[in-house]
Amino acid sequence: MVSGVIINTLLIFCLLWILFRRFLPLQGVKQITIADLKSELKNKDKQFIDVRTPYEFRTRHIKGFKNIPLSDLPHQTNQLSKDKAVFVICQSGMRSLKASKVLKKQGFKRITNIKGGMNAWH
């Protein structure tokens, strides 16, 4: 009986830890809003990546962003410079966060995720 309570407690703790880690901001990845992005777009020394599907990108995108779908990103980071800041956007901010993790694992240091994604762009 006691061991069952301990196991259940450990399972609940593990589940809470996974959820906590899932929604915790990614270390080393800056988060900005669309309002902040508008001032950054003028800087030609930065890279702007849209990780949505080609169809989503064709339908609506921000001028200056390059489309590299999330599924292709691990194999196409050679198109990006590790010396320049990378700004990542998607539809809502979830895929761009995943893309930020991919970039971080591949050695990129200056990564910025755009919170709210294209849903927040007016």
Image (cartoon, grey):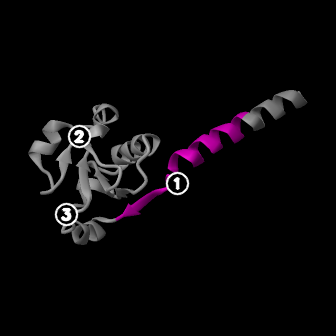
Write the start and end of the magenta stretch as one range. 11-32
Per the rendering, the mark at residue 17 is: none
Residue positioned 57% across, 44% down in the render: 19
- Distance between the Cα atoms at labels 1 and 2? 23 Å
Q: Earlier in the sequence, mark 1 or mark 3?
A: 1
Mark 3 neighbour class, 10 Å CA radius: few under 14, some 14 to 19, many 20 or more:
few
The answer to whether residue 104 is left or right of residue 77 is right
Q: Earlier in the sequence, mark 1 or mark 2?
A: 1
Q: Mark 3 is on which residue type? A: Lys
Q: Is residue 115 magenta?
A: no
The x and y percentages for residue 39 are 24, 72
Label 1, on which residue?
A: 27
SS for dot 2: loop
Residue positioned 41% across, 40% down in the render: 102
Per the rendering, the mark at residue 68 is: 2
The answer to whether residue 93 is left or right of residue 43 is right
Q: For the N terminus, give its image quadrant.
A: top right
Disc nearest the viewer among 1 and 3: 3
Mark 1 neighbour class, 10 Å CA radius: few under 14, some 14 to 19, many 20 or more:
few
Mark 2 neighbour class, 10 Å CA radius: few under 14, some 14 to 19, many 20 or more:
many
Q: Mark 1 is on which residue type? A: Gln
The x and y percentages for residue 80 are 28, 45
The x and y percentages for residue 69 are 25, 37
Give the residue furthest to the left.
Answer: 58
Residue positioned 49% across, 52% down in the render: 26
- Distance between the Cα atoms at labels 1 and 3? 26 Å
Per the rendering, the mark at residue 44 is: 3
Q: Mark 2 is on which residue type? A: Ile
- Distance between the Cα atoms at labels 3 and 2? 18 Å
SS for dot 1: loop
The x and y percentages for residue 84 are 31, 56
